[in-house]
Amino acid sequence: MSIDTTPAPRERIDTTTPALDVRGLKKVYTGHGRDVEAVRNLTFTIRSGELVCIVGPSGAGKTTLLRCISGLLDVTDGEVVLDGKKVTEPPPGMAVVFQEYGRSLFPWLTVRQNIELPLKEKGLKKAERAEKVQTAIDAVGLTDSADAHPWQLSGGMQQRVAIARAVAYEPSVLLMDEPFAAVDAQTRADLEDLVRDLWHKFKVTVLFVTHDIDEAVYLGERVLVLSHRPTVILEDVKITLPDERSQLETRSTKEFADLRHHVYEQIQKAKQGFRPDGDTA
Amino acid sequence: MNLSSLARQLLLAIALPIVLLVLWWFISANNTSPFWPSLETIFKAFPTTWTADRIMADIMPSLARLALGYGLALIIGVALGTLIGLNRTVRALLEPALEFLRAIPPPVLVPIIALFVGYSGWTGKIAAIALGCLWPILLNTVEGVRGLDEVLVDTSRTYRFRKPTYFYQVVLRGSSPQVATGARQALSLGVIMMVISELFAADNGLGAAIVQAQRSFAIPQMWTGIILLGVIGFLLSVIFRVVEHRALAWYRGLRQSERGS
């Protein structure tokens, strides 16, 4: 199997500076008379410029993990370090695209205003804001809908707005929490290509959480496979697919099928409660 | 909306009032009871009763007090409601007391307020109107703030919105549909409180004018005051609707798109 051999050379990946460093992350929910350990001793690093997917079985605590990384949730133990600074609240260098696109956009603002507001909060001048907003709107293909309200758009287009807002913010790391789980299959394929496209264009570092194995393999440069609760990382899979990917070609290659097969196997093991050596649930 | 459908809507809206007025006109036409003067008599009493002087002396003070009391209730209600809505502990602490206070019919407050500031004068009347309007605004604001979408709140946290932006763009605008519901209820309560606050001292104001007319058996004049009150109440609610229609256009659109999908 060609999995752990020779990663595709990517010059623009700066292998020396980690953008995001998660060390020994642990999250225990307390309450209702019992403690629930959702995440246990989870460690991984994302280098600047990478596109990493996290995939795990249902109920693997993916959302918990993402909320801890984004500083929305306090961690029980361990630490999350972004740009060399420990995360204790939502950090300035991070943008999050949520699954619930309809609920993460401000319905009283237009598309343009939705994208502009975070930039305003960042303290950018008006001309600079206008330019960045327009670039982002054009990049996600919403040029004609810039002055519409989010509720006038389809689900896929709403998620494009959320993505444009995140990209315009120019974060060190862009977190995406199952962003396409609620859109139909065709829209989903378009949005996946959009993510690859924006990643190339804006050189943004992306951490993409999904439950969809195909999506993870198709999008990522690396796929982190999560175990069942309490969550740890089962395997860090290098995706050796070529940099230019297409829904039609890439998905029908043998390499894609092999990688998909391998990740699928890991997920099945995870569902059956398999854990790395020396760790017991 | 084209012109003919607009005309149709207008016709539907004014059809019943016209029928009722016509009925009133003919049924009361040959009435001999002094307490039920004919509509014709009432109409004829209008220009002599509501002269420019009287408008300045009675209607204007009433409306000014209503505006002040209502505005005060709006500011206090939204500010306090936001505070209570955002803090679970404060909410648990205050909610039973608020429900109790809300259950007290506001008119009963007028004599109590009078104990402190007297019946005449503006302070007591404005306080009565404000207290009457406060509860629906306050409680609806609490509900609105509590019902804020958590994804929206998370979004504003991850983009590190500053406090003022968060309060205006997320909390205030997010709860504005519920605040508007409370404000609409409060408006009709405000008109009621405006009249009631004037009945006791009966020194000036629209309510006072009606009581004075009734006490001096100027029955047609009394009726003109009552009709005028109805018209004012109606106009106020029309103004409210126009403002709401413009300010909450996004909310109507959102609801429509949710029903459509």
Image (tube, coloured by chain):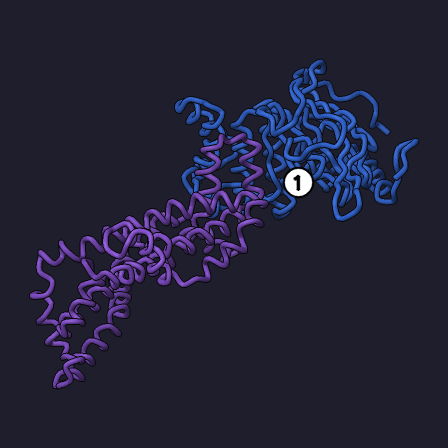
Q: Which chain is purple?
A: B
Quarter of the image for residue B213 reads: bottom left
Is residue B131 or residue A144 the one in the foreground?
A: B131
Q: Is residue B79 left or right of residue A71?
A: left
Residue B41 horizontal/vertical position (percent)? 10, 76
**Which residue sits furthest left?**
B48
The residue carrying mark 1 is A178
Q: Is residue B245 left or right of residue A54?
A: left
Q: Residue at x 37, y 62 (%)?
A: B108
Is residue B260 or residue B183 the one in the foreground?
A: B183
Q: Residue at x 14, y 79 (%)?
A: B37
Determine the colour of chain A.
Answer: blue
* Residue B24 visible in the shown view: yes
Give the class, few, some or many, for how many residues have Cα within 10 Å of label 1's Cα (few <14, many ≥20).
many
* Residue A201 visible in the shown view: no
| Protein chain holding label 1 | A
Is residue A112 or residue B153 the one in the foreground?
A: B153
